[in-house]
Amino acid sequence: MARAEWTFGQRIGAGFALAALVLAVVAAFGHRSSARLIDNDRLVEHTQSVRQEVAGLLSMLKDAETGQRGYVITGDEAFLEPYTQAERTISGALERLRHLTEDDIDQQRRMEQVQPLIASKLAELKRSIDARRTGGFEAARKIIATGRGKELMDQVRQILGDLDQEEAERLQVRFADSEASVRAAQVVMLWGGVLGVLLIAGLGFFIVRTLSREIIGAVGHIQSSSSELQVAANQQSIGSREQVTSITEISSTVSELLATSRQIAESSQRVAHIAGETAQAAGKGDQTVQRASDSVATTRRHMDLIVGHMLDLGKKSQQIGGVLEIINELSEQTNILSINASVEAAGAGEAGRRFAVVADEIRKLADRVGGSTKEIRTLVEEVRAAVNTTVMATEGGAKAAEAGTKQFSELAVSFQGIVGMVGTSREVAREIELSTRQQATAVEQVTLAISNIAKATRETDVSAGQTLQTAKELTQLARVLSRLVQVEAGS
């Protein structure tokens, strides 16, 4: 891995690992020196123990010899106490000394040499003591005077002295090794510590320097990013406020639209109701027109009958002069016919006024014919002319009735069309009402959605404010971090 790709933690870890390696090496040398020093101290203690045992053994022999001399001189058993004590402990001292030197061939050889000499020395002391007890002072003096005891003691001293001398030389060597081990440990620990401190300091300076450069670059990026983040947060905050204002206005507009939709729905309901009433009225009007059309058709039929009757009357009027009875009968029939015509004319309304006048004239004529047959002949021509006029008038009335019937038919068709259109308008009004209610429901849902959007926008505004605050804090932190690394960067 390239050094430029190492992370902050890896570099710190590498520095601590190197420092730990130096400390481990120093600790290893220190442990080795300490182990050697401990081993050497154990050997020194062992050598001192050997020398102490040698000195104790010589002291015991001297005590035994001193007790023997005191007893020989004085004959007092109390002076034998050192001898007795030495005799009991010398064997144990020899065994301990043999055990301490069992790993040394030369010392074991000396121990094999000195052990029988000590036994002989103790035997010589016991013989002189026994001689003092049995033969008195002179017997003991003779044994001592032979010099055997001194000779044995000198040999023992010589051998034990050689043994002690060798141990003393070893002790000097071991003291020198101990001093050398201590000095080596001191040197290793001193220079190893100095080297470790210098290495750690150099490594720390190198890591701080490289990291400072990288941190300065990162701080620059952070400052640039925080500035951009701050600008974006400002724009987001402004946009959020504008969006909140726009959504508030939209919400007000949608609320007004909802109220308008409800009003439209109510108006559509009223229109549908009015359209229903109009449809009922149009239906009734259509029925009235149908009945009027039927009446006009009846009037036309009556007109046709009247025309026929007038034609018959014209024919009969030619025979009036010859048959008075026929005239009288005709007069009566004319009178009846005029009455019926008056009734029909009255039912015909405006269109039957002229016919009513004619019917009235006919009735008068019939009265005159009935009242005076003398005037019949004179009036036949007038009647014939009146009949002709009446026929023409009746034909005109028939034509007018026919035109009225046609107009009533057209009016009935128009009323039926109106009824159909009113029904269609009613259905359309109902559809408009339903659509308006659906629109009102949709507007309510839009209002709810806008409320949620407004809430989310307000939260976005709050988040934008927090982002702006965080960007400011990040900028301030970048400045503080930049000040912290300026010294290392400058150096």
Image (cartoon, rainbow, N blue to C red):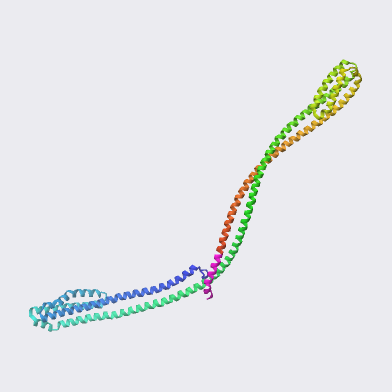
The x, y position of residue 77, in whole percent, is 11, 77
- Which residue lies at the image location 62% right of the left edge and 47% below the top edge? 442
Q: Nearer the viewer, residue 348 or 488?
A: 348
Q: Farthest residue toward the left?
A: 135
As for residue 480 lying within the magenta part, the answer is yes
Quarter of the image where one finds residue 466: bottom right
- Which residue lies at the image location 14% right of the left edge and 84% below the top edge? 147
Residue 33 in sight from this viewpoint: yes
- 302 vs 266: above or below: above
Q: Nearer the viewer, residue 211 or 346?
A: 346
Q: Farthest residue toward the right?
A: 378
Quarter of the image where one finds residue 169: bottom left
Residue 430 in sight from this viewpoint: no
Left or right of 487 on screen, residue 152? left
Left or right of 476 on screen, residue 100? left
Magenta stretch, residue numbers:
472-491
- 477 vs 79: above or below: above
Q: Nearer the viewer, residue 218 or 149?
A: 218
